[in-house]
Image: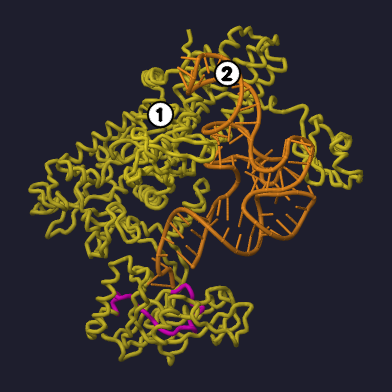
Amino acid sequence: MRPERYNAKEAEPKWRKVWNERDLFRTKNDDPRPKYYVLEMFPYPSGRIHMGHVRNYTMGDVVARYKRAKGFNVLHPMGWDAFGMPAENAAMQNKVHPKEWTYANIATMRAQLQSMGLAIDWSREIATCDPAYYKHQQRMFLDFLEAGLVDRKTAKVNWDPVDQTVLANEQVIDGRGWRSGALVEQRELTQWFLKITDYAEDLNDKLDALNRWPEKVRLMQRNWIGRSEGLLVRFALQPGTTPNGESELEIYTTRPDTLFGAKFMAVAPDHPLARAAAEKNPELAAFIEECKRIGTAQEAIEKAEKLGFDTGIRAQHPFDPSWTLPVYVANFILMEYGTGAIFGCPAHDQRDLDFVNKYGLGNTPVVCPPDQDPSAFTITDTAYDGEGRLINSRFLDGMTIQEAKEEVARRLEKETRNNRPVAERKVNFRLRDWGISRQRYWGCPIPVIHCDSCGVVPVPKDQLPVVLPEDVSFDVPGNPLDRHPTWKHVSCPKCGAKARRETDTMDTFVDSSWYFARFTDPTLGDKPTDRATVDSWLPVDQYIGGIEHAILHLLYSRFFTRAMKKTGHAGLDEPFAGLFTQGMVVHETYRDRNGAWVLPGDVRIESDGTNRKAFHVTTGEPVEIGSIEKMSKSKKNTVDPDEIIGSYGADTARWFMLSDSPPERDVIWTEEGVQGAGRFVQRVWRLVGEIADRSAAWDGAPAEGRIGTAVRKAAHKALAAVEDDVERLRFNRCVAHIYELANNLQDLLNQAKGADEPGLASAFREAGRIFVQLLAPMMPHLAEECWVELGETGLVADTPWPQVERALLVENAITLPVQVNGKKRADVTVARDADQAAIEAAVLSLEAVQRAMEGKPARKIIVVPQRIVNVVA
RNA sequence: GCGGGCGUGGCGGAAUUGGUAGACGCACUGGAUUUAGGUUCCAGCGACGAAAGUUGUGGGGGUUCGAGUCCCUCCGCCCGCACCA
């Protein structure tokens, strides 16, 4: 006896148990089928999963299950990005050890993810905080060190005063720490760096080939890498004007064509020349101090005036030694970019123009726009940076910008001073090396030892891992490793003398820069990867995650893969062949009359079709409906996945996540939407029941009649459409096609009532199978239950994807819309192979067409095969 | 400021990439079933109109037999970067 309602609560755990018992989703590395690697960005074990996780992992799961049915050997693993600050914060607040906190969260979240019914190979699960994982990371760090990919240098770093750690440039957002939100300070520290800039050119060039990445992400990376082509020019300094007899100043410019418009030179406040000059000039020293003070308060920079201080140093124009330019220290010059020095051409650079207007240095336009009279062209307070031809520039006059750039480079390259060319062509990057030192406990220890006589000594590889000590306390701020009584005190591996262990740990972005490679074989005890295995699985065919990782994680991973190639741990450059960035899960916000946020679960909505009003469920008081925003605890607009799965079932949650919004856009979570998804689950159950009944009398007779053909046609049409859309990750369209098929099948079932047509049972049987198979990647539990109901054997999760019968999709008679002068007036049904003449005759004989033509003759009839007919009268 | 994206019913969104605008879902309306609510089933649902029809994809203009889609222009919203020489 078939129950009236589908009981997700009972069915879902039952089917998960069956999948587990059969080890259905365990992936073998020696499987001969073609590989397909689908990966969702692994979660940080923060406590509990949120709806964003549900959306992310559902999408990946649809792809995994679909590709599996399509005959691929699918790798779909899961792990934990388990190191990081929140564990330490929790330790400080709740007196719980970071390890304990992390593993408890992992246990909770693993159970939650498993309740979603994901087709994941859990045997490959990894946690980055596991010594069995980070041991290999330490090994690779040492390999990178040997290969010259690691640097230890003093650098001005971004210091987060709240988290008491260094931040990478990428982790500073609007001058604030990405986690703490504290204003970031500049400090000089000795740090470990990974030399990502070695690959700047390659990381930039290969972006073009990543054609299965969103254009937006590629563009963001391109901007971040910030490649520019320009000229390094060595200006001679006028003898007698420099503090210590310096004779040259190197500048970098992308506009050498504007050299004759130069009015001044400027160097960064921390430029060596500025420092040298400051030693002999207290006023200048004070100015530099002032710049630094403003420099730390990042907010001020945006509004800050262009300020400068004339050092008294004079530079000579490279094309005319008698032409001298004043050298300023200016607050808007960055030491980190180029050479930390510029020549200023105010007419064609807004910043330089602001500067000269303040200090009265004037400007000379040297590029004239095409529509301007060169003799009358002047600049006052808006610099011109467009195209044009050179003026006021001696031998460059009349040239285009490109020609002038080339001419300047050509001439200065040939000239020499002190056995060096006066100028060199140079490609410059905005990208900086990746500082990975963090003064934190809960991270991967950097495996080196500091010895007073031997310097920095790598920990011998056979002594790895350097395991984090567990006896630490968090009652004072700072790094507990640094104050650990025993752990940090070791003997030097080289000379045996007393030495200190490095107490900095690695940025957690290192952990996530290679986990996708480790998934290919997490059992390897002695090495990070097996070359043959990792090369057979990588690149990841489809990577899915949030846009927030467009730069950090994805750029680091691209670099790390290259570094792994150089050190023999992998054989490719690009780790992710296909990338998809999904949108967020958003929800309305609610506030009561006191302005306090109200949980969606405490709100009742009333609607008359146009207006919606909200009330508090317990008090009945009106609640104000606010803007739709990303789910967040602070605004209380969250919905707990556990509650949804508990009341509706995982399939309903999955289905709702995939419907309506295109996956790259934000999806609005609504109670009505979930209910609709839940209704559809029940509808599927009833429909499949009816189909099972209708096809029970199956006698093997093929479907031939009108209804039977229509049933098969509907099924195969949906199959073709869903297939196409899953391949392109257009899940919202898949959902729509499945709804449409359900509607069509219901309709045809109604028509089939009492109909006596040969082979109907056969048609419904086939359509039922296809229907359930289409559902299976999205609602896997329901699909299994329906599969049994249809009388099929085995698991639908283990059944090959059906073949589209293309011949069925070809119509013999087609109905074309008919337009007269571009307006639709009628439909015409013609044979599929009807020729132009036959269609024209059929169209002109239509009464509606005649009427619309108002007796005028047809001047032209346009027939677009299979599409439309347009009569021009 | 620079770069990118977007604008379609009450709402989320479709539109075979220049060929019937509004698929599918939500909300809503009417009817049937039900003691009632819910569920379920049937029907309707851009606007104006009784209908025929007219009109309609942010505004204006253009190309085309034909424009949501292409071009120009204006308006609005969102995202990223931001003193990068």
Q: Where is residue A654 drawn, in percent x and y?
A: 45, 31
Residue at mark 1:
A118
Left/right placement of residue B38 relative to residue A120 reads: right
Foreground of the two, A854 or A570: A854
Image: magenta residue range: A253-273
Magenta stretch: residue A856 in it? no
- Tell which subunit mark 2 falls on: A
**Quick one: label 2 or label 1, which is nearer the N terminus?**
1
**Chain B hue?**
orange
Name the quadrant containing residue B41: top right
State yes or no: discs 2 and 1 in contact (Cβ < 8 Å): no
Instruction: State which chain is coloured yellow.
Output: A
Which callout, 2 or 1, points to the residue nearer the camera?
2
Give the structural element (helix, strand or loop) at label 1.
loop
The amino acid type found where label 1 is placed reads: Leu
Foreground of the two, B30 or A410: B30
Say if residue A138 shows up in the picture.
no
Residue at mark 2:
A768
Q: Where is residue A217 drawn, in percent x and y?
A: 46, 51
Say if residue A789 shows up in the picture.
yes
Magenta stretch: residue A267 in it? yes
Give the structural element (helix, strand or loop) at label 2.
helix
